[in-house]
Image (cartoon, grey):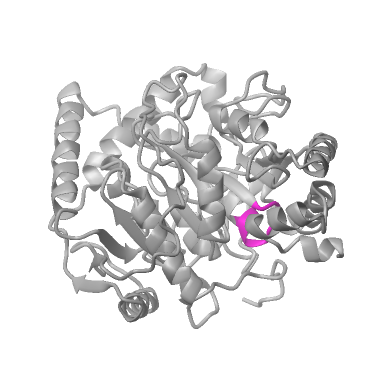
Amino acid sequence: MKDTDLGVLDAVQLVERYRRGDCSPLEATRAALARIDRFNPEVNAYVHVDHEGAEEAARASARRWGKGEPLSSIDGVPVSLKDLTEVVGMPSRQGSLTTSDAPRERDSPPARQLREAGAILLGKTNTPEFGWKAVTDNRVHGATRNPWDTRLTPGGSSGGAAVAAALNMGVLHQGGDSGGSIRIPAAFTGTFGFKPSFGWVPQWPPSREPTLSHLGPMTRSVRDAAMMLNVIGHYDYRDPYAIRGQPDDWGSDIGQGLKGLRIAYSADLGYARVDKQIAQRVKEAADKLADLGAEIVEVDPGFASPLETFQTLWFTASLDMYLQLSDTQRGQLDPGLVSTALRAESLSAVDMFRALSERARLTQRLEHFNRDYHLLMTPTVAVEPFAVDHEVPPGSGMQDWTEWAPFSYPFNLSQQPAASVPCGVTDKGLPVAFQLAGGKFDDVRVLRACHAFMEAHPPRFPAMPDSTRQA
């Protein structure tokens, strides 16, 4: 088997080949590294690649498989981690000039868990500065580009991970999501992204606003995501917000189909403006879910836009970060991040208290809604991928990312599980996706439904970055 063949396999396929002895983790790792070397100059998904460390870990994995003693179901599978995640021996610039290239001396929980499972840590993927916005560019590493059209953004903040998944530069990819940062880039790149229930995938050090932040997988398939969650989805005492009770097998219901599931479908949540082609593709996906056996009910969950609530929390977290920096460091920040932080200066403690109360009411409303419906379906984002180095579609008149991604942050406020599922392309050939959200800790059911759709309607992925399109 050629390395180029290995480079397009998913985790399930790789592990089966390891088990049969058809290939080794070293061959698969070299194939992944070759794809990074080939594609990354065009898309800038990776900001750090550990060739030597990955090959060393792959050799050790190959010895374990040779003895029939793998450490886990993903032993020898190449993985990446977002550059907001600490990994021993790798820098964590977090997209900021205020940080250094010094290698980190501690593993975050996902890095430790993946390493202990025998996964091959390839390197770190790009993010905007401290993950503050929904596109991926920064002053340290530059912009990440969408492989479907390199003139366009892949979204963010886990844009590097999404692009790595789309091009299979590695197989399993860790993202983070505080307002849509897994689901938005998954939608823009045609990959699968899953935000688990809050607290089920531990994180440490904490994010800027830890009660909004969820870590999760970005992959080409739901099975691969479940395999990754079976490793990173375990309690860790270092995370003060960590919650016990994770599934023994996150993929236990995969393959059960959609019969018996009642899915609420909302085209706009009652307040969003959605591109016509996005709306049409998502409606077609709803019809396909019905064809697969789900009961689809078009209904809105009945809440007003929680944007002000989200922004109060998000802006305050940014201001807290800003105030902890020196004057020199403040001058090094992305001006957009500074503007976001300073918008919180006029907020009071009462404003924060009211935002927390509104958050509680939204969560109660959504949890009550899930008593009548197993899942809620919406578009993932409201627009097509747009020009790189812009935070909103040029000429749209929009002010920030929350206007074109109004479907994601409500489920960070409610801390419920939500996924982005690819469901076709626009007339320009750009990816479209729908979102499925469930009640708290109903992650297994969300994964079940996502898998049923993707098995019946497999997505396609770019063979290589497309830099040939003309303006």
x then y, percent, for residue 205: 50, 23
Residue visible at 44% across and 40% down? 248
- In what quadrant of the picture does the N terminus appear? bottom right
Q: Quadrant of residue 111?
A: top right
x then y, percent, for residue 169: 71, 54
Residue 168 forms part of the magenta stretch: yes
* In front of the other: 29 or 38: 29
Q: Is residue 158 above or below residue 96?
A: below
- Asked whether residue 157 appears in the rendered view, the answer is no
* In front of the other: 394 or 16: 16
Q: Is residue 367 left or right of residue 458?
A: left
x then y, percent, for residue 309: 22, 40
Q: Is residue 348 left or right of residue 256?
A: left
- Label count reads 0
- Asked whether residue 321 appears in the rendered view, the answer is yes
- In what quadrant of the picture does the C terminus appear? bottom right
* Residue reaching furthest to the front: 68
* In front of the other: 12 or 20: 20
Q: Is residue 189 left or right of residue 383?
A: right
Q: Quadrant of residue 63?
A: top right
Q: Which residues are magenta?
A: 163-171
Residue 301 forms part of the magenta stretch: no
Residue visible at 38% across and 51% down? 444
Q: Is residue 308 above or below residue 165?
A: above
x then y, percent, for residue 396: 39, 65
Q: Is residue 198 left or right of residue 91?
A: left
Q: Is residue 55 above or below residue 269?
A: above
